[in-house]
Structure formats: structure tokens, C-alpha cells
Amino acid sequence: MSEKDTTASSVPTPAPSPMELVLQFHHTYSVPIRPFSDPTLDYERMNMRMSLIAEEFAELMGAVYGPRARAIIEAATAEAVAADEGERDVIEAADALADLVYVVYGMAIESGMNLDSVLAEVQASNLSKLMPDGSVKLREDGKVLKGPNFFQPNIARGLGLESHTDRGEAD
């Protein structure tokens, strides 16, 4: 079959973007979604969001440099949060978030990790957090908690390393 013979139905559907995956999570669990026309850092769950970013960064540091490095980052994060001066800059925050996405994908590429495949595994895991009755269980700060049907993401499968033990955590 030549390239000209292919039909639109044979063209693979592109994978959802990371933004689309997270929006699906927010819709599924009724997590707040602010209109993109109204960016702000002044909202109730901002500290929880920063905590999640710091937690995942500390996990990455531990995976790359060891448990002591993770502990150092966790301690430094606690100190930084305690020193909060209340100054917020939405432009700088947006720049930093975009840069984080860019450099995270860069590290994944240089490390030979197909992050889109890993994200698909994490997404499946994250969507397994619903309670059996379809309700959502939240931590006091609003973080979605794992229901009894939750399963860990199969990171090894996402990496194409089926024989390796998965140790991933979901958001």
C-alpha cells in the first residue's frame, strides 16, 4: 500500500497532551479549573500545588542522587515555605512552570524515557482513585486520595521495561 492509499481512518490519533490529561483528571475529580483568561496565584489550593511540585522534585532528587539528597530538598522546601513573604508574580510563575515542563521533557529525552508513555500509565493510575460509588475522597488540603480500586502506575511498562519492578507514585 502506498502512502497515497492511506485513509484518514488509518492515521493514528495523537496522544492527548499533558494539559489534556490533567484537565481530564480535574473534570473527573471535580478539581477546580480556573479560566485561562484569569491567571492568578491567589487561590486556596496554591500551597497544596506547590507542595506537590516540591514532593515530586524531592522524589526525583532521591531517585538520581539518593535518599540524603531527597531529605536535603525536603528540609530546604520546608524552610522556604516558612519564609513565605506573600509576594506572588504570576508572569514569573508561568515562565517557571513552562520551563519546568520543558526541562523535564529534556531530561526524559536525554535519559531515553518516553515520558508520554509513562504519563499514560500515570493517568490510568490517577483515574483509578475514585471510590466504588463514584465519589471522590479528599485530603484536608484538597488533594485527591486513593480509593480502594487504586492501582500503582506500571512505570516499567511505560518505559518498555516490563521485567523491571515498578515503584512509581501518582499525583
Image: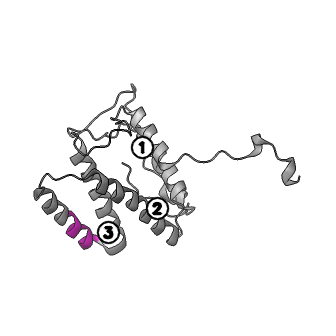
- What type is the residue that disc 1 sits on? Asn
- Residue at screen point 25% across, 38% down: 142
Residue carrying label 1? 126
Callout 3 secondary element: helix
Q: Is residue 64 visible?
A: yes
Q: Is residue 69 rendered magenta in the image?
A: yes
Please indicate, yes or no, whether residue 167 appears anywhere in the rendered image: no
- Classify 11 as above or below 158: above
Residue type pointed to by label 3: Met
Query: Which is closer to the viewer, label 2 or label 1?
Result: 1
Q: Position of residue 89 (x, y in %)?
A: 24, 53
Q: In this view, which residue lies farthest toward the bottom?
A: 65
What type is the residue that disc 2 sits on?
Thr
The Cα atoms of the two marked residues, 3 and 1, are separated by: 22 Å
Marks 2/1: CA–CA distance: 19 Å
Front in this rendered view, residue 45 or 123: 45
Q: Which residue in the structure is indicated by mark 2?
A: 165
Q: Which mark is residue 61?
A: 3
Q: Are marks 2 and 1 in contact (CB under 8 Å)?
A: no
Q: Which residues are magenta?
A: 67-74
On the rendered structure, is 100 left or right of 109? left
**Picture quadrant of residue 34:** top left
In three-dimensional space, the C-alpha distance between marks 3 and 2, rounded to whole angstroms, equals 19 Å
Percent position (x, y) of residue 110? 51, 72
62 horizontally vs 115: left or right: left
Which is more toward the observer, 165 or 155?
155
Residue 136, image x and y in percent? 33, 31
